[in-house]
């Protein structure tokens, strides 16, 4: 059981999830990078858990053919609520206003 998690651990978990989704879709890293409009190195660093994809979260989800919320489905992993909140805060800290509005609308739709 994971009791606490730092940002590096969260990056790794998201990277694992992205890798899992890419393999399920039978896509190469290059195919996903092309769909996102980023270079292979940028995509690879997301999948390896080196970088958070905060600037690319929507295009990443679209490239993988999933919703943004599906990127964060970690039910098969044991992640604390606090770790999830920290991760969301970190990802949205420097997010462009347009993307932040989308995230807001998504979360708001869950409660309304």
Image (spheres, rainbow, N blue to C red):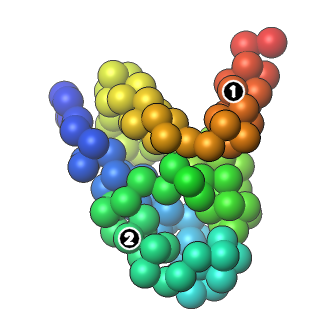
- Could you tell me residue 104's position as x and y percent? 69, 27
Picture residue at 43% right of the left edge, 81% below the top: 41
- Whole-angstrom CA distance, mark 1 to mark 2, is 26 Å
Q: Residues within 10 Å of mark 1 (few under 14, many from 20)?
A: few
Q: Answer with left or right where residue 79 lies relative to residue 100.
A: left
Looking at the rendered structure, the secondary structure element under dot 2 is helix
Q: Quadrant of residue 99?
A: top right
Residue 42 located left or right of residue 67:
left
Answer with mark 1 or mark 2, whichever residue precedes in sequence.
2
Q: Is residue 7 above or below residue 28?
A: above
Residue 96 is left or right of residue 40, and the answer is right
**Is 70 placed above or below 43 here?**
above
Query: Which residue is pictured at 46% across the width and 35% down the height?
Result: 93
Quadrant of res 12: bottom left
Label drawn at residue 30:
none
Which of the image's four quarters has the C terminus? top right
As drawn, 84 above or below 55: above
Residue 1 visible, this orientation: yes
Viewport quadrant of the N terminus:
top left
**Which labelled disc corresponds to residue 45?**
2
The spot of residue 34 in percent (x, y) is: 65, 82
At mark 1, the secondary structure is helix
Disc 1: which residue: 104
Name the spot of residue 30 as percent of width and height, x first.
Answer: 56, 87
15 left or right of 71? left
Q: Quadrant of residue 106?
A: top right
Q: Which residue is painted at 32% across and 37% down in the image? A: 78
Q: In this rendering, does residue 28 appear at all?
A: no
CA neighbours of label 2 inside 10 A, class few (<14), some (14 to 19), many (20+): some
> Number of labelled discs?
2
């Amino acid at each position: 059981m994971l009791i606490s998690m730092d940002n590096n651990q969260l990056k790794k978990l998201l990277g694992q999830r992205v890798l899992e989704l890419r393999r399920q879709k039978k896509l190469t890293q290059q195919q996903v990078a092309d769909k996102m409009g980023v270079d292979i190195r940028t995509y690879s660093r997301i999948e390896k858990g080196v970088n958070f994809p905060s600037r690319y979260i929507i295009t990443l989800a679209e490239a993988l053919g999933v919703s943004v919320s599906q990127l964060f489905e970690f039910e098969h992993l044991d992640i604390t609520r606090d770790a999830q909140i920290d991760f969301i805060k970190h990802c949205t800290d420097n997010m462009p206003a347009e993307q932040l509005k989308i995230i807001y609308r998504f979360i708001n739709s869950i409660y309304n």
